[in-house]
């Protein structure tokens, strides 16, 4: 997590991060860097509830898509309260019949159309991935144009099948979070 914090902190003012996580539940440390320390732009990509593999699951597991809706809503509200929506944009992946479990981080230096850095592997950048599970990731820093183009195509394909998250999305009937999920997220978020 130290490397990720340092990368987030080192982004230039006109730089851009694309941040993908199938399970959007950033740690407080990452949230602090994005909201208060980094000057870069962020495009944050996450699963729409319909692209969450737990949608329709029986029992408590069925609440998982709602939990991530609640967590993303809280972050969305923070971004808007701080008037950072020009710098931090949120997107949801949704494609009929597909689930979303992509993850990674791509950094574009100022005035560059290609990423110079990427983190790939199994991190979700959330509490469980950082503090509980054994996760592996690789950080690639490159100026190899062919590799940069491949990395750009990879993340562009994800964003191309995504929709920018707007306030109205949270007002839809299927996005209403059950009360019991709010309670569970309140005391167990660090386990997600």
Image (cartoon, helix red, strand yellow):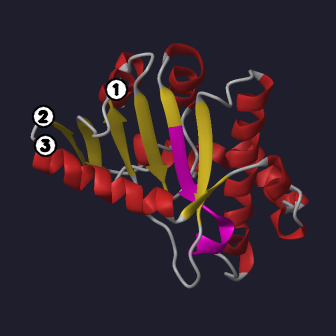
Is residue 10 shown above or below 43?
above
For image coordinates 73% across by 44% down, the residue present is 187
Residue 46, position as x, y percentages in the image: 55, 55
Circle nearer the N terminus (1, 2): 1
Q: Which residues are magenta?
A: 43-54
Residue 96, position as x, y percentages in the image: 59, 82
Quickly name the residue at label 2.
143
For image coordinates 39% across by 17% down, the residue present is 12
Give me the C-alpha separation between circle 2 and circle 3.
6 Å
Q: Determine whether the residue tagged by mark 1 lies in a helix, strand or loop.
A: loop
Q: Determine whether the residue tagged by mark 3 lies in a helix, strand or loop.
A: helix
* Picture quadrant where residue 65 is located: bottom right
Q: Nearer the viewer, mark 1 or mark 2?
A: 1
Give me the C-alpha separation between circle 1 and circle 2.
14 Å
Q: Is residue 44 left or right of residue 151?
A: right
Quickly name the residue at label 1.
111
Quickly name the residue at label 3.
145
How dense is the environment of label 3, judged by Cα within 10 Å: few (below 14), some, or many (20 and up)? few
Residue 49, position as x, y percentages in the image: 67, 67
Residue 9, position as x, y percentages in the image: 41, 18
Circle nearer the N terminus (1, 3): 1
Is residue 44 shown above or below 92?
above
Is residue 170 shown above or below 50?
above
Q: Quadrant of the N terminus?
A: top left
How dense is the environment of label 2, judged by Cα within 10 Å: few (below 14), some, or many (20 and up)? few
């Amino acid at each position: 997590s130290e490397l990720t914090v340092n990368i987030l902190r080192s982004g230039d003012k006109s730089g851009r991060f694309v941040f993908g996580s199938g399970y959007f539940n950033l740690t407080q440390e990452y949230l602090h860097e994005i909201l208060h320390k980094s000057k870069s732009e962020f495009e944050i990509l996450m699963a729409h509830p319909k692209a969450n593999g737990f949608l329709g699951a029986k029992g408590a597991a069925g609440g998982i898509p709602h939990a991530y809706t609640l967590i993303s809503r809280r972050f969305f509200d923070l971004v808007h309260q701080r008037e950072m929506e020009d710098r931090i944009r949120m997107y949801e992946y949704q494609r009929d019949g597909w689930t979303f479990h992509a993850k990674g981080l791509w950094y574009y230096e100022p005035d560059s159309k290609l990423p110079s850095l990427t983190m790939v592997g199994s991190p979700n950048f959330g509490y469980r991935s950082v503090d509980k599970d054994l996760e592996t990731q690789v950080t690639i820093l490159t100026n190899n144009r062919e590799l940069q183009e491949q990395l750009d195509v990879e993340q562009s394909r994800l964003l191309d099948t995504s929709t920018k998250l707007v306030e109205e999305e949270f007002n839809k009937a299927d996005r209403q979070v059950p009360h019991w999920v709010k309670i569970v997220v309140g005391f167990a978020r660090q386990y997600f």
